[in-house]
Amino acid sequence: MKVSVDRSVCYGSAECAHRVPDVFAFEDGYGVVRPGREESADDPQILEAAERCPSQAIVLTERRAEAE
């Protein structure tokens, strides 16, 4: 799964960056996914961060199946 942060929903609690600093950062008042870490959503810490995000701004999406 892919992880992203919906900036239109994020209100900048920085909970994600405190919880999983190797995946999330806090920039310009918003949580962001660190470059290259977008494919980290299978990590249980990421799932917990998404569940505990106060604004529910962390988005987990399925990867698209590769063309055969």
Image: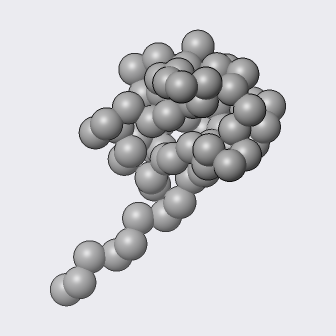
| Residue farthest toward the right in the current orientation of the protein | 54
Instruction: In the displayed orientation, state which residue is furthest to the left.
Output: 68
- Quarter holding the C terminus is bottom left
Instruction: Please identify the residue farthest to the bottom as the structure is shown.
Output: 68
Can the viewer see residue 16?
no
x then y, percent, for residue 15 = 67, 20
Residue at x 78% of width, y 37% of height = 55
Name the residue at the front extreme.
Answer: 28
Q: Is residue 39 above or below residue 27?
A: below
Tell me, what colour scheme is on the image? one colour
Say if 30 sits above or below 41 in the image.
above
Q: Is residue 50 left or right of residue 68?
A: right
Q: Is residue 19 left or right of residue 53?
A: left
- Identify the residue at image location x=80%, y=31%: 54
Is residue 31 or residue 20 the one in the foreground? 31
Location of residue 5 (image quadrant): top right
In this rendering, position of residue 42 left or right of residue 6 = left
The picture places residue 6, in percent across and down from the top left corner, at 61, 48
Residue 60 horizontal/vertical position (percent): 57, 52
Indicate whether 60 appears above or below 28.
Answer: below
Is residue 25 visible from the viewing direction of this image? yes
Identify the residue at horizontal 47%, vertical 17% (top origin).
Answer: 21
Front-most of residues 1 and 26: 26
Q: How many marks?
A: 0
Give me the residue at 45% from left, 54% from top: 1
> What x and y, as percent, mark residue 2?
45, 52
